[in-house]
Amino acid sequence: MIKNQIPNIITLLNLLSGSIAVIFAVQNQLIAAGLFVGLGIFFDFFDGLLARLLNAKSELGLQLDSLADMVTSGLVPGIVMFQLLRTTLAEPEFNNAEWTGTADLAIDFPWIAAIGLMITLASGYRLANFNIDERQTTSFIGLPTPANAILILSLPIILHFQPTAFATSLILNEWFLIGLTLFSCFILNANIPLFALKFKTWNFKDNFLRYGFLLLSVILLIFFQFLALPMIIICYLILSMLALLRN
């Protein structure tokens, strides 16, 4: 039925957005990459919502969703972290990569920058584990890859739109970037239950934590703009852990 394919089409739009983001990320156009990652995450949210509304859940949709997320929320953040480390360690400013047309293996970046690609590896492991983990039907174990992608992609966005002295010195510090990479790899696969923004009902009592988180996110965005993006992810982790302790 055509109805059953609508969520899959939305998922493919996520994959398309992620593929375009990869092209921009490789060219070191990180703001454009962030824009298309955001678009992909938007599609990622609505494919699941449509699947539930249309009662069109399928094993194909589950696998396709993870494959799309691997590109949009796994590959792109790894490349972006690589580019940030490369810039911090070797280049004074962001430059577009130029195609030389040669087949020679010319390494024009510090090898340590490749540490950023650990995010891609950790994302792939998380997504594969997610598909076989029966505990993650109503909540998550470890940070979801879209949330992690927002955390990583927020860095070049902050550098471009809100380059305060403190934010710039922190983000362009190689030790901070390496530490964030290791933290990202850990939290993606940590055995820590995190609540999901999946509303089975609109009842306030049953969704108090979700509504509270969304309200807090809006307030942070109003007051801090792009600086709020990493704050929102940190708040998500803290609220999930507080909820776990409460239970």
Image (cartoon, rainbow, N blue to C red):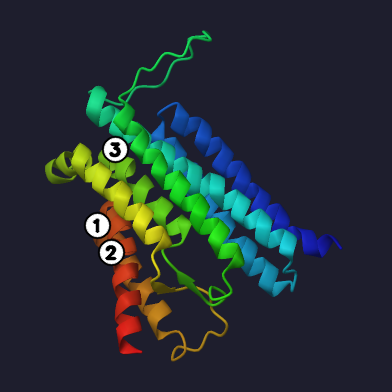
Tell me residue 67's x, y (percent). 62, 50
**Residue lying farthest right?**
1
Tell me residue 1's x, y (percent). 87, 63
Q: Earlier in the sequence, mark 3 or mark 2?
A: 3
Which quadrant holds residue 44? bottom right
Left/right of residue 167 with respect to residue 119 in the rendered view: left
Does residue 200 sit above or below 84 in this rendering? below
Residue for badge 1 = 224
- Marks 2/1 in contact by CB < 8 Å: the verdict is yes
Which quadrant holds residue 48? bottom right
Tell me residue 160's x, y (percent). 29, 38
Residue 34 in sight: no
Residue for badge 2 = 220
Left/right of residue 59 with respect to residue 22 in the rendered view: right
Q: Amino acid at mark 2?
A: Leu
What residue appears at the point 26 percent right and 53 percent down from the top-left corner?
227
* CA distance separating discs 3 and 2: 19 Å
Q: Amino acid at mark 1?
A: Phe
Q: Residues within 10 Å of mark 3 (few under 14, many from 20)?
A: some
* CA distance separating discs 3 and 1: 15 Å
Mark seen at residue 160: 3
Does residue 193 sit above or below 81 in this rendering? below
